[in-house]
Amino acid sequence: MSNIRSDHSGQYKCKARNKCGERESEAVMLNVMYSPRNVVASISSSGVIVEGDSVNLTCSSESNPPVHIYSWFKENQTSSVGSGNIYIISNIRSDHSGQYKCKAGNKHGEKYSDSVTLNVFYPPRNISASISSSGVIEEGDSVNLTCISESNPPVHIYSWFKETQTSSVGSGQMFSISNFNSSLSGWFYCVAQNEVGSQRSAAVSLTVKGGNVLYAVAGVAALCGGLIFILIVVFVWKSKHRLDDIRHKQDDIYSTVTAKVSETESRDPEEIHYATVHHLRVKDMKTSEETEDIYENSTVQQHDAAERSDVQMMEDQYVIYSFVKVK
């Protein structure tokens, strides 16, 4: 048998015959060894593979003796990513996508399989909305909004929304707005969708030239109004507190004057000296230090005894009385 092949393997026997008869020999086994062949890699999944799934890659071959080592390789990588005739990928990710092949080896040799494609589907991600305008948007301009995303399979529906509205305002990867005006100003975002899922982008602002200035002026005006209100509240509180202190001091002075006058009613009018009475309005109120100076510098003058009743009848709460000195 020349150039023996694996299909020559099997049991063989011979038969001898002469004129007296024939007889067969016992069978002998011919076992032809060979390296792996018909090496095939396959993916054990009948449906769509989505991120998070688990996938089995299987390697099959023919050889004699049987294969004793299986190795798995991804695309053009020289180092293996797994071993065994079944390679299991748990919680699969999009970066697992690619071409895979296996290598089967025995003591007579080794062989690679053809590549199989592992295609991992995932919903849209890395979505961004951009304005295709290099300058400032003015009244009457046309504006194009573009939505960019990454997904597998590709996005088949793009929808555009305005932050203040629940229904879409447009569709398509590029959304055009003609004759743009201030009433259309606002924040816009896009939603990308494929058969696996959907995701939205961050919002971008569309504002007519001058709109930002108006918003800035409004913000400054609101801030100034708030500061003015706070200052008014603080001023009113301090004024009330100051007025209460002056009233308490006036009550003490008035009580002292009343007591002194009552004590001297029985004395000779010529022996009594009265201090000058100063009438002050609220706007003329001084600090407590200035008020004490008024008390100290008041000139004592002699008055007719008949004026005592007039002093006692003073009802103006803003009258400051100095003390009465009796000889």
Image (tube, helix red, strand yellow):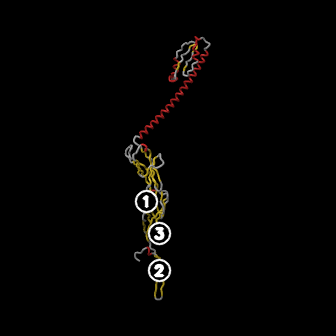
Element under label 2?
loop
Q: Earlier in the sequence, mark 1 or mark 2?
A: 2
Q: Amino acid at mark 3?
A: Pro
Residue drawn at the location 52% of the way across and 17% of the way down: 298
Q: Which residue is mark 3?
A: 66
Residue drawn at the location 47% of the way across and 69% of the way down: 66
Cα separation between marks 3 and 2: 26 Å
Q: Which residue is mark 1?
A: 98
Q: Earlier in the sequence, mark 3 or mark 2?
A: 2
Task: Give residue 304's position: percent from left, percent from top.
Answer: 56, 12
Residue drawn at the location 40% of the way across and 40% of the way down: 210
Cα separation between marks 3 and 1: 29 Å
Element under label 3?
loop
Which disc, if any, is residue 285? none
Task: Give residue 183's position: percent from left, percent from top.
Answer: 43, 43
Q: Which residue is mark 2?
A: 13
